[in-house]
Structures are given as structure tokens and as C-alpha cells.
């Protein structure tokens, strides 16, 4: 009698044919203006942005890493001969940006390994559910470093105990682990191991809050017991606060064995502000984000995860999406001398694609010049517009920083604390009709002499940080404006407010008569203010008015809306809908779409009727949407059987098993749940009719 196994195996068979290499030409199927070159330009632009961000990362974390390395290096210098039981511990408060913790602790591990000791152990709570798994992970990290690996020489073999411990890490304990580290190696290994002798054993707890209290306490006590033979140093990764964690997670009899020093990592919000300030809102990189796109990914960062890593993932997606879909984006990464030769090589089809860019199309209609229909003249116009945009963006961001510096001089900061707020406010509408800018001008009218001096000096410093391309004579060029601001500073410093003419000191000296009621006093003061007329302004007020008028025109000219320039899409990515679709997942909507319309994902024909070809869970889902809040399981299964088998025959065991599995999956997804109101019924949890 033949028998059938109840279990079936699924095996992966390696193909004899080698897989074909993915070519860029096969991936870039969309036609456009030189898609392959655009893709390469996008890759280069992203590498430049990534290098700038990595350099900024190292600058931000340099102080933290150096202090941690010094702490680990000096942890056992004092009282190195005494049998101390306190373990030097660094409590590193990292903040709630949990997705970035792995990257940070990996960088700390590299710093310690390269500078101090090869014995660095990184423990995560998911790998330390009990003491056995914790010791296994600890021994794997402890013994698998480069200098302690066995030599490849066949003549020299490790002893049996050492070989067994290296193969079976779960058998390692603190006692035999210390013996293994201190065991006398062969002669050829002694030179290597002498360099690591006496080095501290650094244990990094990446997510301390997630560890079990009992396991963590037992591990601390065990390490304290062997602290004389094994110089431990702990680094606790804390997302909240050390005070809360120490009171909740570590009992007193475990805490007394730790000598804790607190360290604080830079906050994620301040780190992000530096990235936006020094990478995105500068003329150094040709790729720019529009105001709404920048605000969108900022909302994702501030409202979801506080993750710099995820922010950079979204930014990279925006860069690649921009250079993949925008036909004119190849022009943004070229110098002024390189634009004209490239545009001269554009074909007729590529020029037609450029004409479809909305801003350029509107510009051509506005110009209403029939000569621009000729390819040669159109190419010249494109080169002219691109170079104008490059000069504008070269000036735009320094002037934006000047406006931000002026707003910071006032207590309530009408333009916002961060420069990104000023950028988002000025991106689309400029400053001419901006309410925040109008409030700033009103505050400038009542600013003191010291405030004006501080503002003007800040603007001079910002405008002096780079060189600018000469675009013709204008009073609002940064180089000319810088000299103008310096003249204003000299004029203010030369003023002596104490020496005023008699006419400037004339005031209405009529004293207020004694009044009986407060409203009478208010009325007299109001009448005096109306009748008081000053025939002359003071010298300071004259200079103040000159400064105010010039600043107003300076900002309105240089901070014109970016969207008013033709071909601004070449530099700016402004597709918030694509960012939302690809980077902000909506699992609930995706599950509902998959269950209600499986053809959306399985390439089936769209139909309103329930098809027997659809997956079982989709059939069960559609049937359950036609029911009320309480569903009879037998009726539901009968309807399922009718659709699957397209017959009213008796329900067989296979159909019953398929239905039970589909119903269980719907319960797992949260669409139904068991109920005690009726026997053999389930309760519907979503979109109930009754």
C-alpha cells in the first residue's frame, strides 16, 4: 500500500545559467532627454550630498565619540591593581530616534576597536531573551575578533577545550571565557596577543530599556564577580533618561556595582537642522527641494520616527526621482560654460520635451515671440534662462540667511527660529506679500540703534562668505549691498544721540492738568498725540528710514518667488504626491485594496462579481462585507463553497479547510473576532451595516 507523506519539502535549485547583469539601459525605459546621462548625473549629485552629510555627521559626533573613547581608555587606569567590583559605565542618552541607534553604536564600536581594544561586544534585547542566548551572543562577539582567530598554519592546532568553545559558543561561561582570553597561545601568536593583553572588554547595551530586569541584573552581578580578572566597561544606550531607567530597571543591589558617567548624544532635531542648513539650503548642490516637499519630509521626521537615516532615504528617493523623471534636470549640474555645448547637441525630440515643462511653456506663451520657435533661438533662450537661474540661486540662499538673521534679533522671532521656516514661507510667494515679512518691517521701525548695528553686521558677515557672479549693474547685488550695509554701519556709529539741535528737542511741555478720573487722563493724552506734530526727524530716524527702505527693496528683489522663473523645475523637485505614495506607507488601505480588488496586484480582470479564481481570503472578505455585524459561520461557509466549486453539492473537507484558513487570516488581520452573543457566529469589526 502506497503512503503519502503529510509534509512536503520546498527546495531551492540553483540555476545553471548565470543571471544577467542589470543594465541601466534596461531600467531606464522611459524616453526623455538623455536618460542614461541624467541617471549618472543623479548618482553623482547624490554622492556629493551624501559626502557632505557624512562630513557633517563626523563633525557633530566627534565630541561625543572622543569623550567616550577617552572614558573607555581611562576607565581602568586608576586602581588597576586593586580588586575592584565596580564596573565603569557610560550612560549614553541617545534620544528617541531609535532607527538611528544601530548606526551610532556601530560607529562607536569601530572607534573603540580601532583605538583601544578589540574586545567589543554589542548586545541587543532581541538576542538576549534569556541568560543562555545572552551568553552565546556575548561569547560570539568576544571571541570572534581578528587577533584571537586561530592561525591558518596546519602545524599549530588549538587545544581541544579552546576549539570546542570556539565552535559551541553557548558553552562559554565567564570563567572559561576569561581563561580562553588569557590562555597562552603558540609562539607565533604571542606577538599578536601581547598587543591586546590587558585591554578592556567593552560591552554595549544598545537598547537598555528593552532588556529584562532579572537577566540584566544577573549579568551585571556576574561581570562584577569577574571584574578583577576581566576589565569590563559598560556602555548603556538609553532612549529616555538615565534616572527613569535606573529606578525602573536596575535594583539597588545591581546598581551599586556600577560607576556611572552620563553622556548625552546630540538631539535628532538639532542634527536635522544642521543638515538642512548646511547641505540643502545652500548653493553648493544643484538639487533643491520645494517648500511643500521639504515641509512634508519634515512632518514625517517630526511626527513619526525622528530618524536621520529615514530622512536621508526619502531625500535620496527625491534626488533619483527628480533626475529620472525631469527631462531638463541634466542641465542643473553643469557650469555656465558647459550648458551651451550640451544644449546645442539636443535633438528635435529632446527640445520638444523641454517645451513641455510647465514654466517654460508659460514663458513661451507670455513672450509670444515667433522667433523662439526656431531651434537655434530656442536653444539660446534655454541657455540664457538656465544661467539666470544659476545666478539667482547663487544669491538667493545668502540673502535668505540675511533675512533669517534679522528676524532672530527680535524676541518673538516673526520669521521663525529655523532657516527652513523662512525658506518654506518665501518659496512660492516671495516676501512682497508675506505677512511675516511685513511684521518684521514694522519691528524694524522701532528697532534700537544697537539692534540695527547687530543686524547690519550679521548681513555683512553672511554676504562676505562667498564670491558672486556679476550679472550687471544693480544696487541690490550682494557685493554692492555689502558695501551699502557697511556705509550704514559707519553712519550709525558716527551718530551722537546726545547732541541734538534745539528743534529736535522741542516737545510739547504743556503739563497735564490734574484730573479726577482715569478716562479724562486717557482722553487728554489721546488729544495730545493727535495734535502733536513734529516738524523734523532726528538724525537716527533719518538713517533708520534709509536702512528700512533699502532692506525692503533688497529682500523683495533678491527673494522673488522661485516659481516665477522659467525652468525652475530643472533645479527644484516639487512632487509631494510621489513622496507620499512611495515613502509614507498606508498598510490599511493596501490590505483593503488587495482584498477587495485582487486583480490590482495579481493582474486579473477587474470585475464586481466574486470570481472563483480569486484567492480564498478575497472571496471570504467579499462575502463578509455583504453581512451584518454578526455573521453565521455555516452560512458564510456555504456561500464560500458555492462560489469556489460553482455548485450546490455537499461541502467537502478540502473546501471546509480552505474556508477555515481564510477566516483565520481575516481574524488575524482584524476584520472579525469570535463572539459569545451567538453560537457558531463571529462579529464583524469593520464597515458594519447594522
Image (cartoon, helix red, strand yellow):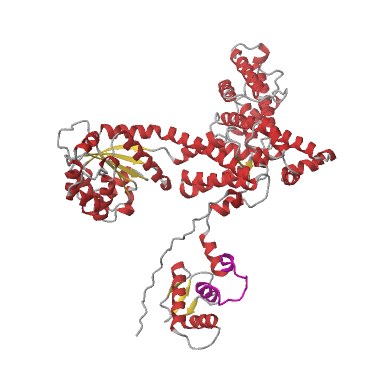
Q: Is residue 451 visible?
A: yes
Q: Position of residue 419 (x, y in %)?
A: 56, 35
* In front of the other: 644 or 234: 644
- Residue at 51% in and 88% down: 649
Q: Position of residue 446 (x, y in %)?
A: 61, 26
Q: Is residue 587 rendered to the left or right of residue 36? A: left
Q: Quadrant of residue 443?
A: top right
Residue 604 is inside the magenta segment: yes
Compared with 11, 188 (above or below) is: above
Q: Range of the magenta residues?
A: 597-624
Q: Is residue 508 visible?
A: no
Q: Is residue 595 rendered to the left or right of residue 131? A: right
Image quadrant where one finds the C terminus: bottom right
Residue 249 is inside the magenta segment: no
Q: Position of residue 183 (x, y in %)?
A: 17, 42
Image quadrant where one finds the N terminus: bottom left
Disc count in the image? 0
Compared with 320, 263 (above or below) is: above
Compared with 276, 462 (above or below) is: above
* In front of the other: 548 or 684: 684
Compared with 557, 110 (above or below) is: below
Q: Position of residue 364 (x, y in %)?
A: 78, 41
Q: Quadrant of residue 509?
A: top right
Return the residue found at the far right: 370
Amino acid at each position: 500500500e502506497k503512503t503519502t507523506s503529510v509534509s512536503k519539502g520546498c527546495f531551492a535549485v540553483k540555476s545553471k545559467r548565470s543571471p544577467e547583469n542589470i543594465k541601466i539601459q534596461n531600467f531606464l525605459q522611459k524616453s526623455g532627454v538623455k536618460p542614461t546621462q541624467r541617471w549618472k548625473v543623479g548618482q553623482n549629485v547624490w554622492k556629493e550630498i551624501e559626502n557632505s552629510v557624512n562630513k557633517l555627521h563626523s563633525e557633530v559626533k566627534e565630541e561625543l565619540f572622543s569623550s567616550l573613547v577617552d572614558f573607555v581608555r581611562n576607565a581602568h587606569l586608576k586602581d588597576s591593581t586593586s580588586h575592584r567590583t565596580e564596573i565603569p559605565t557610560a550612560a549614553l542618552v541617545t534620544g528617541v530616534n531609535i532607527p538611528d541607534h544601530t548606526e551610532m553604536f556601530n560607529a562607536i564600536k569601530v572607534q573603540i576597536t580601532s583605538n583601544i581594544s578589540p574586545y567589543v561586544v554589542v548586545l541587543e534585547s532581541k538576542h538576549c531573551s534569556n541568560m543562555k542566548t545572552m551568553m552565546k551572543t556575548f561569547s560570539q562577539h568576544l571571541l570572534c575578533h581578528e587577533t584571537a582567530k586561530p592561525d591558518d598554519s596546519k602545524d599549530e592546532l588549538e587545544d581541544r577545550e579552546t576549539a570546542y568553545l570556539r565552535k559551541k559558543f553557548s558553552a562559554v561561561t565567564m570563567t572559561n571565557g576569561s581563561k580562553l582570553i588569557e590562555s597562552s597561545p603558540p609562539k607565533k601568536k604571542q606577538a599578536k596577543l601581547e598587543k591586546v593583553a590587558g585591554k578592556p572588554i567593552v560591552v554595549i547595551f544598545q537598547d537598555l530599556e528593552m532588556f529584562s530586569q532579572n537577566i540584566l541584573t544577573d549579568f551585571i552581578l556576574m561581570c562584577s564577580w569577574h571584574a578583577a580578572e576581566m576589565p569590563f566597561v559598560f556602555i548603556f544606550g538609553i532612549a529616555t533618561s538615565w534616572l527613569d531607567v535606573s529606578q525602573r530597571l536596575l535594583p539597588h543591589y545591581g546598581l551599586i556595582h556600577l560607576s556611572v558617567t552620563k553622556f548625552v548624544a546630540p538631539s535628532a532635531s538639532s542634527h536635522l537642522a544642521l543638515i538642512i542648513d548646511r547641505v540643502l539650503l545652500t548653493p553648493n548642490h544643484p538639487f533643491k527641494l520645494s517648500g511643500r516637499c521639504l515641509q512634508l519630509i519634515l512632518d514625517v521626521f517630526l511626527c513619526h520616527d525622528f530618524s536621520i537615516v529615514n530622512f536621508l532615504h526619502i531625500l535620496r528617493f527625491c534626488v533619483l526621482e527628480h533626475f529620472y523623471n525631469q527631462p531638463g534636470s541634466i542641465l542643473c549640474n553643469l557650469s555656465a560654460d558647459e550648458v551651451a555645448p550640451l544644449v546645442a547637441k539636443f535633438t528635435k525630440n529632446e527640445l520638444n520635451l523641454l517645451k513641455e515643462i510647465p514654466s517654460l511653456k508659460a514663458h513661451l506663451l507670455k513672450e509670444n515671440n515667433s522667433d523662439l520657435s526656431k531651434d537655434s533661438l530656442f536653444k539660446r533662450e534655454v541657455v540664457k534662462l538656465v544661467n539666470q537661474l544659476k545666478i539667482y540661486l547663487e544669491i538667493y540662499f545668502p540673502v535668505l540667511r540675511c533675512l533669517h538673521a534679522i528676524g532672530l534679533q527680535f524676541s518673538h522671532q516673526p520669521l521663525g527660529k529655523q532657516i527652513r521656516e523662512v525658506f518654506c514661507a518665501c518659496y512660492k510667494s516671495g516676501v512682497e506679500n508675506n505677512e511675516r515679512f511685513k511684521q518684521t518691517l514694522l519691528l524694524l521701525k522701532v528697532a534700537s540703534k544697537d539692534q540695527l548695528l547687530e543686524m547690519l553686521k550679521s548681513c555683512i558677515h553672511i554676504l562676505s562668505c562667498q564670491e558672486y557672479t556679476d550679472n550687471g549693474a544693480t544696487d541690490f547685488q550682494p557685493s554692492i549691498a555689502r558695501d551699502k550695509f557697511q556705509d550704514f554701519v559707519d553712519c550709525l556709529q558716527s551718530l551722537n544721540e546726545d547732541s541734538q539741535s534745539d528743534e529736535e528737542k522741542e516737545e510739547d511741555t504743556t503739563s497735564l492738568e490734574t484730573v479726577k478720573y482715569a478716562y479724562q487722563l486717557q482722553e487728554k493724552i489721546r488729544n495730545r498725540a493727535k495734535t502733536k506734530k513734529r516738524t523734523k526727524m532726528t538724525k537716527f530716524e533719518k538713517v533708520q528710514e534709509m536702512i528700512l527702505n533699502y532692506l525692503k527693496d533688497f529682500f523683495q528683489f533678491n527673494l522673488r518667488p522661485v516659481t516665477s522663473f522659467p525652468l525652475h523645475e530643472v533645479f527644484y523637485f516639487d512632487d509631494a504626491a510621489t513622496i507620499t505614495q512611495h515613502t509614507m506607507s498606508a498598510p490599511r488601505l493596501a490590505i483593503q485594496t488587495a482584498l477587495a480588488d485582487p486583480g490590482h496586484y495579481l493582474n486579473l480582470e477587474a470585475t464586481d462579481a466574486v470570481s472563483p479564481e480569486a484567492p480564498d481570503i478575497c472571496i471570504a472578505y467579499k462575502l463578509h462585507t455583504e453581512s451584518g455585524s454578526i455573521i453565521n459561520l455555516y452560512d458564510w461557509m456555504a456561500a464560500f463553497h458555492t462560489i469556489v466549486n460553482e455548485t450546490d453539492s455537499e461541502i467537502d473537507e478540502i473546501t471546509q479547510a480552505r474556508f477555515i484558513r481564510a477566516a483565520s487570516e481575516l481574524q488575524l488581520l482584524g476584520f472579525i473576532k469570535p463572539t459569545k452573543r451567538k453560537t457558531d457566529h463571529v462579529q464583524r469589526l469593520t464597515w458594519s451595516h447594522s
